[in-house]
Image (spheres, rainbow, N blue to C red):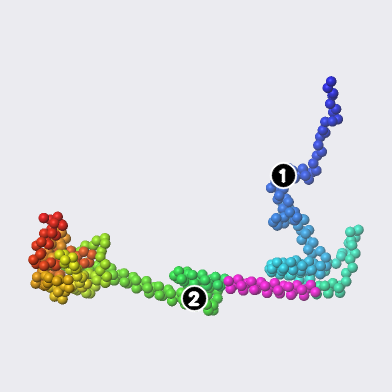
């Protein structure tokens, strides 16, 4: 038989939360953290308000504690805090505490209020002579310690200035080495604006100016050289065109060393043209190179000093016994008279100068016909 449950065993209603806890529970997490941050014990950053436009009473109370007691007690408190900062080499903070200690010694003495009444009023014996002695000891210690802070700060400032100076000098040297002369000159001008008598900076400024003059001189020379080269090239083209001489360039020009097609006077198109010339002996697979062949000279004048040839054992190559030919732009051959100037041969408009080099083939007369036939076969002109 089932038993009837006892109503007294049912759980009763839970008790209400304390008002303070209920209020916190109703707030968001961010709001709670914001309120906790106003409590000195939980502060992560300074908040001097109560959140409603008023002062933070707890914080103000802690601040007031720093000034509770006699002048000697207040000053000693600040001095000890300064000593703690000095041990950590926080010289600026330490100096600030020593300043506060000295200021406290100059402030009014906090004597007990003679009119105060009630059980909380504690009678304090106050010995002015003893208090004055304490103040003197604290004052002397604060002055000495503050002087130490100033000395250490000045050392740091000097070191910082030295390091900054070294950095700036390195920076300037780097700018100069990279030829960033405008930036280097600007840095020197700015530095001398602050320190007009800085000798190292003046030396760097002179170095920048000298380097700038040198760069400008080199740049001017380069531009003048480029302008002259361009002018010489145009003058040479004008001279060749006016003489009806054909020229052509290829993708792979030969190495002529210091030989080149040029004018005697590079800026005068009417002056004499000078050609590098290669003499080919095709039937012998031999050659000679003439670096400077004037347009006014003839082939015969050069053959006179070239012949006899060291490899010509049969003595086939003599000025009277050879003929000379040049290939034409059309792929044919033109005979070169040994008494005709090179300028007239080239001015006929048939042969061409390829990559600044004129080519003349020299063959013995008795083998000329066979060589010409072979040349035509190679060119496909039977």
Q: Can residue 121 be seen in this view?
A: yes
Residue 164 lies left or right of residue 251; in this view the side is right
Residue with the mark numbered 2? 204
Q: Give the range drawn in magenta.
A: 137-163
Callout 1 environment at 10 Å: few (<14), some (14 to 19), or many (20+)?
few
For the N terminus, the image quarter is top right
Between the residue at mark 1 and the residue at mark 2, the CA separation in whole angstroms equals 67 Å
Name the residue located 55 percent from the left edge and 76 percent from the top edge.
195
Name the residue nearer the viewer: 345 or 172.
345
* Res. 112 image quadrant: bottom right
Please tell me which residue is depicted at 42% across the width and 73% down the height of the picture. 212
Q: In terms of secondary structure, what is the magenta stretch mainly?
A: helix
Q: Toward the viewer: 265 or 202?
A: 265
Residue 313 at x, y percent in the picture: 14, 71
Q: Mark 1 points at which residue?
A: 27
Q: Where is residue 97 in the image (x, y as percent from the top left)?
A: 73, 67
The vertical placement of 140 against 354, above or below, is below
Q: Residues within 10 Å of mark 2 (few under 14, many from 20)?
A: some
């Amino acid at each position: 038989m089932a038993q009837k449950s006892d109503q007294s065993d049912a759980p009763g209603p839970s008790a209400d939360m304390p008002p303070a806890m209920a209020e916190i529970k109703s707030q968001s997490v961010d709001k709670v953290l914001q309120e906790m941050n106003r409590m000195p014990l939980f502060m992560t950053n300074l908040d001097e308000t109560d959140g409603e436009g008023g002062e933070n009473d707890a914080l103000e109370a802690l601040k007031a504690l720093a000034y509770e007691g006699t002048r000697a007690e207040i000053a000693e408190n600040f001095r000890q805090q300064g000593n703690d900062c000095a041990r950590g080499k926080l010289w600026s903070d330490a100096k600030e505490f020593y300043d506060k200690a000295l200021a406290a010694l100059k402030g009014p003495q906090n004597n007990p209020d003679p009119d105060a009444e009630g059980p909380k009023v504690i009678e304090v014996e106050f010995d002015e002579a003893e208090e004055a002695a304490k103040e003197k000891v604290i004052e002397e210690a604060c002055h000495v310690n503050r002087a130490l802070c100033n000395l250490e700060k000045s050392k740091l400032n000097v070191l910082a200035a030295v390091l900054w100076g070294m950095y700036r000098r390195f920076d300037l040297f780097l700018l100069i080495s990279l030829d960033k002369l405008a930036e280097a000159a600007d840095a020197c001008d700015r530095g001398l604006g602050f320190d007009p008598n800085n000798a190292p900076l003046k030396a760097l400024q002179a170095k920048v100016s000298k380097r700038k003059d040198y760069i400008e001189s080199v740049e001017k020379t380069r531009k003048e050289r480029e302008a002259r080269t361009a002018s010489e090239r145009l003058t040479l083209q004008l001279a060749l065109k006016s003489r009806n001489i054909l020229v052509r360039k290829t993708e792979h020009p030969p190495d002529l060393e210091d030989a080149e097609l040029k004018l005697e006077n590079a800026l005068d198109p009417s002056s004499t043209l000078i050609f590098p010339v290669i003499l080919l002996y095709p039937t012998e697979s031999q050659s000679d190179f003439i670096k400077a062949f004037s347009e006014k000279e003839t082939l015969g004048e050069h053959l006179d000093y070239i012949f006899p040839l060291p490899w010509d054992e049969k003595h086939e190559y003599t000025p009277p016994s050879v003929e000379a030919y040049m290939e034409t732009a059309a792929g044919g051959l033109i005979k070169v008279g040994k008494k005709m100037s090179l300028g007239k041969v080239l001015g006929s408009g048939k042969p061409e100068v390829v990559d600044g080099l004129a080519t003349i083939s020299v063959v013995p007369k008795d083998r000329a016909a066979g060589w010409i036939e072979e040349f035509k076969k190679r060119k496909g002109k039977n």
